[in-house]
């Protein structure tokens, strides 16, 4: 039996013993219990079920979940047009959230809770999307070959010191497009292209594999340094497989650019779909995601940093770093910069 059904029956049973006034109120709550929020999500963590259940318990609104890859969800909402059942879209990376906004499938939301609890740099200024958890793109190094004092900034990885010692996944990775988009905002086209060329010159191998593959290669000595999202390191450290734990033990995590603009931080986030049939419930759901209990579950699902300042950080993640200086460039800026960033990366040979 679903939670919304339980709420429905409880409300129904109460009807018999109430006055007319109370009856009309009960009818409202029965109607609410039948409401459904259609959530299109690119997240697929078991812990998310708890998020949905707590929302249903709080509001009586049942969640109907559609899971798929982000780009497929965006395409689906576009092709469903005005008939789309989607109320909320949840996905990762500001680049994709920007893509959804650019496709015209999100509507602006005005919410005091979201505006107060989410720092300005982690929400789209017009209210089209909001970040609910954070991931830092950090430098990962082989502890036998590199000391933290050898490291400083993303920019420095393009210097001759790192020739033949750096690896990266390809320019197809939206994470690298967002990172390059952040440098683009700081330096402009020319300097960013020089930086990308410097990185490519330093590559120990052609870009291949995902973030986890970069960490494993650095642990195995195929290169000395790489850059990845924090949760991939934590995932290896928490793995049941001894070989993954060995990989995590061999590498260190360094938060770059602490003496200037801060480490590049990206988000998991979402927004209300333009054609939502339940825009109020959709906004309520986003506000629910910022509640202290939801924040811990949402962040924990993928070993990310919670958005809410007072929410607890996973101890393993915290052991790699917390309280570091975050780049306060608005996520909408580097999200929007993705396309130009990709062109720059391709020109630089970062295939
Ligand atoms: Fe990822």
Image (cartoon, helix red, strand yellow):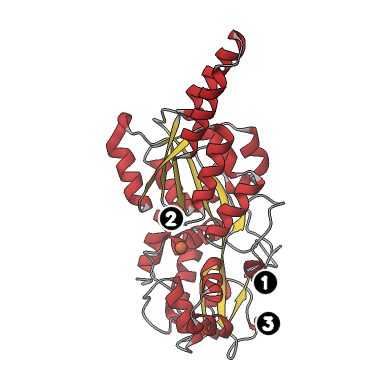
The residue shown at (38%, 71%) is 350
> In the picture shown, does residue 283 fall above or below 159?
above
Q: Report, in whole angstroms, how far the alpha carbon at label 3 lies from the one at label 1.
A: 19 Å
Q: Position of residue 190 (x, y in %)?
A: 47, 63
The correct choice, above or below, for 271 with respect to 220 in the image is: above
Q: Nearer the viewer, residue 261 or 198?
A: 261
User: How far apart are the alpha carbons under marks 3 and 2?
Assistant: 38 Å
The disc, 3 or 1, on the residue closer to the chain's N-terminal end is 3
Q: Is residue 68 visible?
A: yes
Which residue shows up at 43% across the image and 55% down it?
Answer: 44
Q: Quadrant of the N terminus?
A: top left
Identify the secondary structure beneath mark 3. Answer: helix
Query: Residue 44 shows which numbered tag?
Result: 2
Secondary structure under tag 1 reads: helix
x and y, in percent, of residue 285 in the image: 53, 38
User: Which numbered dot is residue 242?
Assistant: none
Q: Which residue is mark 3?
A: 149
Residue at horizontal 59%, vertical 91%? 144
Q: Which mark is residue 319?
A: 1
- Counting other residues with Cα less than 10 Å from the Cα at mark 2, is it few (<14), some (14-19), or many (20 or more)? few
Q: Residues within 10 Å of mark 1 (few under 14, many from 20)?
A: few
Badge 2 marks a residue whose secondary structure is loop
- Single out the residue that lies furthest toward the left: 79
Q: Are marks 3 and 1 in contact (CB under 8 Å)?
A: no
Lower position in the chain sequence, tag 2 or tag 1: 2
């Amino acid at each position: 039996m679903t939670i919304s059904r339980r709420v429905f029956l409880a409300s129904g049973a109460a009807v018999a013993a109430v006055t007319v006034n109370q009856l009309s109120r009960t009818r409202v709550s029965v109607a609410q219990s039948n409401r459904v929020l259609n959530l299109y999500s690119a997240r697929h963590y078991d812990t998310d079920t708890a998020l949905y259940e707590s929302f249903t318990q709080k509001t009586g609104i049942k969640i109907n979940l559609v899971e798929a890859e982000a780009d497929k969800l965006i395409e689906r909402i576009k092709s469903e047009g005005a008939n789309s059942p989607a109320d909320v879209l949840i996905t990762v990376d500001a680049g994709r959230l920007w893509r959804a906004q650019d496709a015209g499938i999100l509507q602006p939301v005005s919410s005091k809770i979201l505006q107060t609890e989410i720092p300005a740099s982690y929400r789209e200024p017009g209210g089209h999307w909001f970040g609910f958890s954070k991931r830092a793109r950090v430098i990962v190094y082989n502890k036998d070959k590199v000391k933290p004092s050898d490291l400083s900034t993303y920019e420095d990885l393009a210097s001759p010191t790192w020739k033949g010692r750096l690896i990266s996944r390809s320019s197809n990775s939206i994470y690298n497009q967002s990172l390059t988009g952040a440098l683009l905002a700081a330096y402009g086209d020319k300097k960013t292209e020089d930086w990308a060329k410097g990185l490519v010159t330093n590559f120990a191998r052609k870009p291949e594999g995902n973030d986890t593959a970069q960490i494993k290669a650095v642990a195995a000595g195929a290169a000395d340094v790489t850059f990845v999202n924090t949760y991939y390191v934590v995932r290896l450290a928490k793995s049941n497989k001894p070989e993954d734990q060995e990989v995590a033990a061999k590498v260190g995590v360094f938060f770059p650019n602490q003496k200037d603009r801060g480490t590049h931080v990206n988000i998991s986030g979402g927004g209300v779909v333009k054609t939502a049939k339940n825009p109020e419930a959709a906004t309520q759901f986003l506000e629910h995601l910022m509640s202290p209990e939801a924040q811990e579950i949402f962040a924990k699902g993928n070993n990310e940093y919670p958005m809410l300042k007072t929410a607890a950080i996973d101890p393993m993640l915290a052991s790699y770093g917390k309280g570091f200086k975050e780049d306060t460039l608005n996520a909408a800026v580097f999200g929007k910069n993705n396309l130009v960033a990709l062109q720059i990366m391709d020109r630089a040979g970062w295939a």
